Image (tube, rainbow, N blue to C red):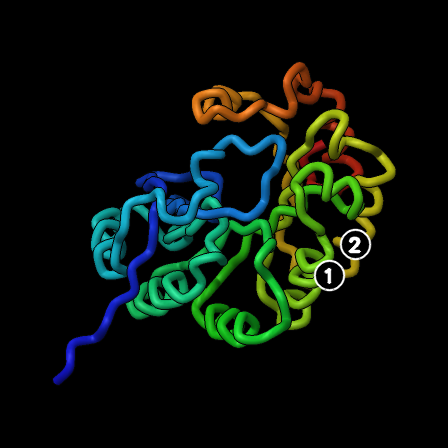
Amino acid sequence: MEKEQMLTGYVHSLESFGSVDGPGVRYLIFLSGCAMRCQFCHNPDTWEMKVGTPYTTDELLKKALRFKEYWGKEGGITVSGGEPLLQIDFLTELFRKAKAYGIHTTIDTSGNPFTRKEPFFSKFQELMKYTDLLLLDIKQIDDAKHRTLTGQTNQNILDLAQYLSEIGKPVWIRHVLVPERSDFDEDLQKLNDFIKTLHNVEKVEVLPYHTLGSYKWKELGYEYPLEGIEPPSAERIKNANRILQTGKE
């Protein structure tokens, strides 16, 4: 019998006990590679696709399963990045094998690679068969401001949100609150209006911008684009939580 040919993925880092990226205790896998250039990115060292450590899906699953007893009923595996959808074949194989062990699977994504064009769309539909939850980052609802903030359009990201609503796939919407970039009342209201059109959103989270990753930009020789911009005040965080109806006002 011919041995199954396993895919190799490039992994930036692993975290054994995550508590914020999905329900319960999570085993976090951060994949390498991202096409977005978010001005607030705290992991610019994940941008390059093949800078990470190569793993097969079996190697990763073996590492994760050592912690399964700590996950309880709610926990499981979350794959983040970088942008995990850039390694969609690897991700699908990993999640297909994870579901065979009854593991809860979550993707933390910016949605940037999403398209309804082939061959990506069929691959994404296959991936969804083995995915329990998506954490979808909507960086800015305004397309022009989104392009300034990330270097990319948000049109296909919003289309991803709509598609996930169409198929009833559970989603947590996340919004990074950045002063002078994504913290505008009118945009937060537009984002809330958009979220209300979706039928699959289990949770909305405001993630306050922080400067903890700025040193990485300097280490990599990049100019930090948000130099001088401080994290949002407690008042602005409360305001965003109120407008986005997160329940954390």
Q: Which residue is mark 1?
A: 198
Of 57 and 100, which appears nearest the observer? 57
Disc 1 residue type (three-letter): Leu
Residue 180 versus residue 36 in the image, above or below: above
* Quadrant assignment for the N terminus: bottom left
CB-based contact (under 8 Å), mark 1 and mark 2: yes
- Indicate left or right for 76 with 34 as reference: left
Residue furthest to the left in view is 1
Residue furthest to the right in view is 186
Q: Which residue is mark 2?
A: 194
Residue furthest to the front in view is 221
Q: Position of residue 156 (x, y in %)?
A: 68, 59
- Indicate left or right for 193 with 89 as reference: right
Q: Residues within 10 Å of mark 1 (few under 14, many from 20)?
A: some
Q: Position of residue 237 (x, y in %)?
A: 71, 27
Residue at image coords 65%, 41%:
150
Residue at image coords 59%, 39%:
37
- Indicate left or right for 89 with 179 as reference: left
